[in-house]
Amino acid sequence: MEQLSKDQTIALREKLIGKSCQLFFKKNPLKIVRAEGQYMYDEKDEAYLDCINNVAHVGHCHPDVVKAGCDQMKMLNTNNRFLHDNIVLCAKRIISTMPEKLSVCFFVNSGSEANDLAIRLAQIHTGNKDIITLEHAYHGHLTSLIEISHYKFNLPGGIGQKPHVHLASSPDTYRGKFNDITHNKEDLADIYANEIKEICENVQKDGKGICAYIAESMLSCGGQIVPPSGYFKKVYENVRKAGGVCIADEVQVGFGRVGKHWWAFQMQDVVPDIVTMGKPMGNGHPVAAVVTTPEIAESFRKTGVEYFNTYGGNPVSCAIANAVFDTIEKENLREKAIVVGEHLLDSCHLLARKHSIIGDVRGLGLFVGIELVKDRETRIPATEIASYVVSRMKEEHILLSSDGPDCNVIKFKPPMVFNKENVDEVITTLDRVLKEVRENTELDSLIKLPVIKSEKVMSKDARNTFKKPINKEETLSI
């Protein structure tokens, strides 16, 4: 295939690709030509440490996953209306990780398709239409999901809130509507859950019932939010009393990212009625699934309308998903998420002791957020600084992103092969970048500051042999 220069690629993209399809790092976008493990490489073969790509769950281009897909593609790929072992074996693997009542699978191609089908199942099973969703939530790009994604419909050019969509506050205990300044932290789960109760009661007063409550088990686009303990238990109880079902969106945080469990909802000791998954399931290959109860699946069957998805659950996709499961178990990636995740959290907390611009550090496993604020008392978001930090870290060949309602939360959700040495490299580099911020004082105008060149980035060879842990106590001395 013809090899294009970066300029040629940019020119063709501007000419042929829709302008609303945006890139990371707009000013100087990266052209990535290959990847391996937790590293991505540009057209100059420069290595970038990937801290944000949760799609490549078991590492970019994992050889066992690639081989499984290639071997199956050489033999057969067809739709799931023919009998094949891979789909049932994949379903068996998924079900084995779930609570007992979640025992029926539907296969689709993406997290968006999974969430769309979940809503359809909920509507048919309950006979209701009203849906409860959360502020700043994102559940996918299909029309049905834009309607329930405050992250999208609330934008200036968005579609706005539909009458059947009911919005509850994001259970953010740091800068949310209710937080640890305005209320006792122990009460926040009840306070946020009471909003759901009120919505349910108001819908019932109008003579209707709830169709579903949908939420990510931990909110990613919403700012790496970990809901307070007990929140989901109280929410699920209220939703079910109002005739609704509870949907756990695990597209971003499932498949062992939290370490202690396969699924993040298990951290709150709840059992959803429907679970959706995508992204990590195929390590970059488009495969996703919906898991539900026999009762909900039976309601769907009784409609008499066949569910048909040409590529959902095809032999190649399921071979790849099975290989991802094998890799997680063989390489003990859940256990690794616990150990490396704790090291990352500890390192971020240590960094926060040195840099007052870090207002909050939160997360579980390899799902961590650092919230930047201009002042710890007022908690005013440091949006421009977060943008500056992400840009500077890219110059240091470390890929991060910022998100949340004010785009002031630095996100970590790397491939599960991320290790302690990677953490040390990120933290020491971030320490240096935040020192630049501190030395340039004028925080409100930081976005206008010139880029400060620092140490030369590691070469590819040096990066690949980087093994010696850094003494963080010494490096981050306060």
Image: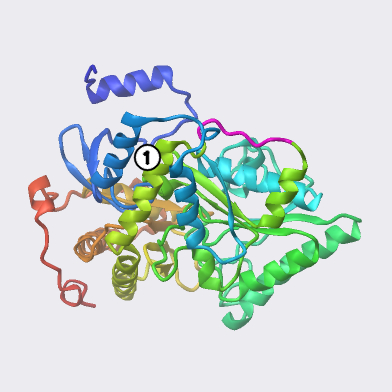
Q: Main secondary structure of the magenta part?
A: loop
User: Which percent across, then down, holds residue 460?
Assistant: 12, 46
In this image, 112 relative to 367: left or right? right
Q: Which residues are magenta?
A: 305-311
Binning the other alpha carbons within 10 Å of mark 1 as few (below 14), some (14 to 19) or many (20 upward) gives few
Residue at (23, 16) in percent of width and height: 2
Q: Work out whether residue 354 or residue 282 is closer to the camera in this orientation and state it.
A: 282
- Residue 446 in sight here: no
- Residue 252 in sight here: yes
User: Which percent across, then down, holds residue 274?
Assistant: 62, 56
User: Which percent across, then down, holds residue 184?
Assistant: 60, 83
Asked where in the image residue 422 lies, by quadrant, the reply is: bottom left
Q: Work out whether residue 1 or residue 154 is closer to the camera in this orientation and state it.
A: 1
**What amino acid is labelled 1 in the image?**
Phe
Q: Which residue is mark 1?
A: 24
Residue at (64, 38) in percent of width and height: 158
Residue at (11, 58) in percent of width and height: 466
Position of residue 463 relative to residue 367, above or below, is above
In this image, 173 relative to 69: left or right? right
The N terminus lies in which quarter of the figure? top left
Position of residue 301 relative to residue 344, above or below, is above
User: Which percent across, then down, holds residue 280?
Assistant: 41, 49
Position of residue 21 relative to residue 37, above or below, is above
Q: Which structural element holds mark 1?
A: loop
The C terminus lies in which quarter of the figure? bottom left
